[in-house]
Amino acid sequence: MRQIGTSKSLTFVDDTMPVGDAFIFNNEARPFTPPVHRFSSRPIHSSSDNSLSHRMCACNRCFEVKCRFNETGYLSVNITNVTNVTNVANNTRGSTVGYKQRGNDISYFYVKVAGRDDLSATIVSDQDRRLDTLSEIRVEYGGTHNITLKLIHTNKSSAYGLDDPQGKELDCPMCLLSNSTICHLMVHSEFLNTSSEEQLRWIRDPAGTSGNMPCAFYENSCYHLASNGLQESRDFERSVAECFRSRKFVIVGDSHEEMIKKRLSPWPKGWGFRLDGRGILHNISPDKSMSAYMARKIPPVFQEGDMLRHLSDGFYQRMQDDEHFDGWVFSSGHWDLRDTSLDEYLVRLRQLFEGWSRFREVNSNVALYWNGVPPYSHKRDVWGGLERRTNVKLTLADVEAKRLCVEFNISFIPFFDIALPFYTESCDTHHYLCPKKDCPVGEAQLDLLVRTICE
């Protein structure tokens, strides 16, 4: 296995150890990228009841952080605002660029949990109840887990992309109020989940550059486990080759789906592709005059998105009648959420799933797959203060999309879950799959997609 992520500057170890190519955990190299902050040589251990509570600060705000393992293998992270602390500026770290002090406004946090054999991430809030269900993180194995937190928004309007101009998310690591050099927590659990291998979904690195890179997917996590053996890889390659020869799929979506087409070059014979990334709502103002729109001289004007329109006007049905596809892979989110509110997107997202459900009623032998919408790396600056994508919006959109997949019996690929622990490590300004670059996160997502549609 290889380290997930290629930037050596993002490799972190105990301060007493030299920086290397792997994460050093209990004196053993681990092949994944750890949390985004350097660990102190003074660990903070939990109490004997698998819980801990510490006051942590970032960007002039302080919070009570409580972490606890329960007996079913979930780690809960609960945060309470306790900002009424004087002179916290000397006890906190992190950039305050774009930060606006607004008293007791709602705060939002990126949380990463790294254990010996698992790694996951989530986004939580101290007051926003819409994120309550995400405060529990599935942890598959017992042992000590490092928890790092980052303050990313200090008010609700910013978190939901409603500021004008909209700024990027903050990069404020949470550190102990008592010792600003310690920017992580450690919590220990004695439980050990003994799930059978039949419950795992194994995938491998399709690039073939580093042997196998299997993952097991459980709800909101991707765990990088030990290799499942060369035989599994050969069986998988044979089954995929047969799938590509005998079955036909069409992929419709935005540039994230377009990267799949570029990566699977040569494109399998008979497969289809549509760049219908403005699937739900299409803001036509930038198409008329990008400069005028960016200068706020013309307002956003929306029309029905490509995917909704093609479902209603029969275009996709004509494609199906002509090509007889075995399955459709679809996704829409980044363009929509760049310009629209989360609530508007969720209403239209239901309409999209209802449209695909009606499509399947006419084409009963066709399989449908939601490819997922990944997090946003915030490296693309084209839209300036009109860039309204936030990972809070994308997180809640992903939760609703999964719920709709269950309601309408549509298979889904957990693209968001796979990429969130590494969301700043896009292979370009915002993609996680780049044909000519080493992009393990995108390769893992692509591999799971291929396995899912070919099984």
Image: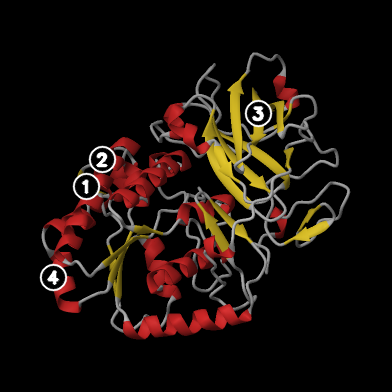
Query: Mark 3: which secondary structure?
Result: strand
The answer to whether residue 398 shows anywhere in this view is: yes
Which label was assigned to residue 347?
Answer: 2
Which residue is drawn at the image coordinates 85% and 38% (left, top)? 42
Q: CA distance from mark 1 to mark 4?
A: 20 Å
Which residue is drawn at the image coordinates 65% and 28% (left, top)? 65
- Residue type, numbered disc 3: Lys
Q: CB under 8 Å between callouts 4 and 2?
A: no
Query: Mark 4: which secondary structure?
Result: helix
Q: Quadrant of the N terminus?
A: bottom right
Q: CB under 8 Å between callouts 2 and 3?
A: no
Q: Where's residue 395, x and y in %?
A: 45, 43
- Residue type, numbered disc 4: Arg
**Does 170 appear above or below 263?**
above
Assess disc 3: are there few (<14), some (14-19) or many (≥20) residues with their C-alpha within 10 Å of its C-alpha: some
Which residue is drawn at the image coordinates 34% and 60% (left, top)? 254
- Residue type, numbered disc 2: Val
Mark before the other along the chain sequence, 1 or 4: 4
Residue pointed to by mark 3: 66
Q: CB under 8 Å between callouts 4 and 3?
A: no
Q: CB under 8 Å between callouts 1 and 2?
A: yes
Which label was assigned to residue 351?
Answer: 1
Depth check, mark 2 against mark 3: the one in front is 3
Depth check, mark 4 against mark 3: the one in front is 3
